[in-house]
Amino acid sequence: MDRSPGEISGRARVFAVFGCPVEHSRSPVMHNAAIRALDLDAVYVPFKVEPQRLPEAILAMRALGMAGVNLTIPLKEIGLGLVDRLSSEARRIGAVNTLWWDDNILVGHSTDGEGFWRSLEALEGNLLRKALVLGAGGSSRAVCFALADHGVRVSVANRTVEKGQKIASEIMEALPHAQASAVSMEADDLRSAARHSDLIVNCTSVGMIPKTGETPLPPDCISSHHVVYDLVYNPLETRLLREARDRGARALNGVDMLVHQGALSFELWTGMTPPLDIMKEAVRGTL
Ligand code: ATR
């Protein structure tokens, strides 16, 4: 049957993001932009799913024959126990952001770590040896493992130091040649860890709208040799990034990671490489 460009036919593949809340998700805009650019017979929709109803929502995904699903806050950890198979990446970071079908097997995977690394690879001329990672939640785990996988030494700074220590020791256990440690969020500890690092990544929510006046790092920790990467993308330029730029450092916001982790999900679902620039523009247009 002929299909005109942009048409959603009776054969359309349905993709979705499940989250709670989900209204802030940029994934529908980003994925639908890629679907349009490639003129796929598909659509990507948001569903608000309460955590306790995720098992039902995944049964619905199976019953409805949905082609792929992203999980976002606070469902990424709950999703671990609800799939037929977990990827080794999902298992080690303890989170699932992508559900995809391998034949009829529902696989839970996380594209966050590789998405982060791919967005860093786009940086030319930066040989990274050591990173200071702020925060020890879910996104920090993905970032820390991705860095350690690629031979970057990691210091995890967190308000609750034990959580940073847990990530560091799990990395050392999983990757025998990796070097990882934990530090507190005290200014002196941050200064010392930053001095020995070439990359600083903010994986906390500090600085995100509406509290845009806050920063997780005293500005004097930053110097011009640093790459400062804030996973926050709303606002596009956080206080941390503004201070990094003022100090001559290279500043990166969270849009790139968002786009790369989304592109990796899209590749798993469709086998196609989506247009990153178009996805990025679509996200930026919402900010
Ligand atoms: P995500 O999935 O985005 O990583 P998360 O798992 O809730 O979110 O983790 C949030 C991280 O931001 C945690 O490391 C948290 O520190 P604690 O473990 O001590 O709670 C950190 N964080 C949140 N608000 C913070 C604040 N005001 N100051 C410092 N750290 C903060």
Image (spheres, rainbow, N blue to C red):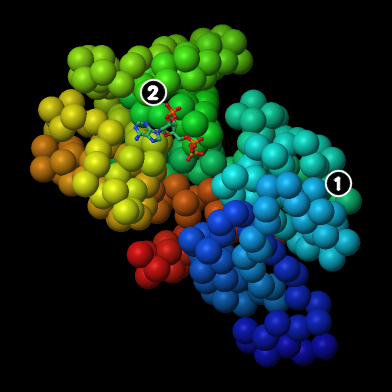
Residue wearing tag 1: 105
For disc 2, does the CB lie below 8 Å from ligand 1? yes
Q: Is residue 44 left or right of residue 195?
A: right
Residue 202: x, y in percent?
A: 35, 35
Q: Quadrant of residue 45?
A: bottom right
Query: What's the amino acid at mark 1?
Result: Ile
Residue 238 appears in the picture as rendered: yes
Q: Nearer the viewer, residue 34 or 110?
A: 110
SS at mark 1 in the image? strand
Q: Quadrant of the N terminus?
A: bottom right
Residue located 80% across and 59% down the image: 61
SS at mark 2 in the image? loop
Mark 2: few/some/many CA within 10 Å (<14, 14-19, 20+): many
Q: Nearer the viewer, residue 38 or 282?
A: 282
Q: Quadrant of residue 21?
A: bottom right
Residue wearing tag 2: 158
Residue 130: x, y in percent?
A: 34, 21
